[in-house]
Amino acid sequence: MTAIGRFQECMRSKYEIPSFFRFPSRNLNHLQGWTGFDFPGRNGKYSSFKWNFNHFSGVDYNADGGKNAIFKIHGENKAWSTHVDKEKGSYDYLMGADVDFVRLKPMTHLNFMVPYIILMLFWLCVGTPRCC
């Protein structure tokens, strides 16, 4: 497992074999996934956006049974990206919870956060700005 939310949520999913992303199983199963991200310690300082399973297309861990695998979250318009590298079936899935870029809310939130992230990375590379 490479990433983890703060709390688990129950959702329906299909198990997918990593080298065959394009061929999911036909069976829907219940899944306990770490998809709840609410960052309570930040108290809304940077963003009030709260992530949940609706904002992701898949996870790599089922806490119910402790299974590491690729699980595609079932729901309306849920799909892996199609314009990605075909190596190992698909490189759409690279982190613990795959962001569903079809949804407007995650896209809007990430577009809002990108300038802040770039600024933080710049400060890490060259040091924090100092007064003259």
Image (tube, rainbow, N blue to C red):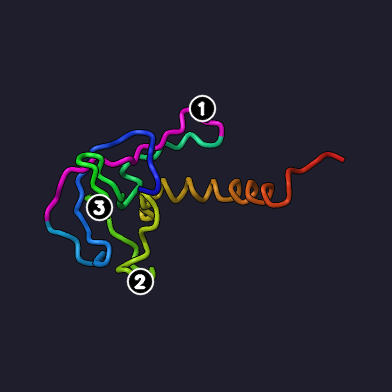
Q: Amino acid at mark 3?
A: Phe
| Other residues around mark 1 within 10 Å, as few (<14) / some (14–19) / many (≥20) | few
Tell me, for residue 71, which label it has, or none. Answer: 3
**Disc 2 on helix, strand or loop?**
helix
**Disc 1 on helix, strand or loop?**
loop
Q: Earlier in the sequence, mark 1 or mark 2?
A: 1
* Label 1 vs label 3, nearer the camera: 3
The residue shown at (38%, 41%) is: 4
Query: Is 48 left or right of 56, judged from the image as shown?
Result: right
Give x and y (percent) for residue 105: 41, 46
Find the distance from the CA under tag 3 to the CA under tag 2: 18 Å
Find the distance from the CA under tag 1 to the CA under tag 3: 31 Å
Q: Is residue 78 above or below residue 42?
A: below
Give x and y (percent) for residue 110: 49, 49
Give x and y (percent) for residue 108: 47, 48
Q: Amino acid at mark 1?
A: Asn
Q: Earlier in the sequence, mark 3 or mark 2?
A: 3
Q: Is residue 44 magenta?
A: yes
The residue shown at (17%, 43%) is: 30
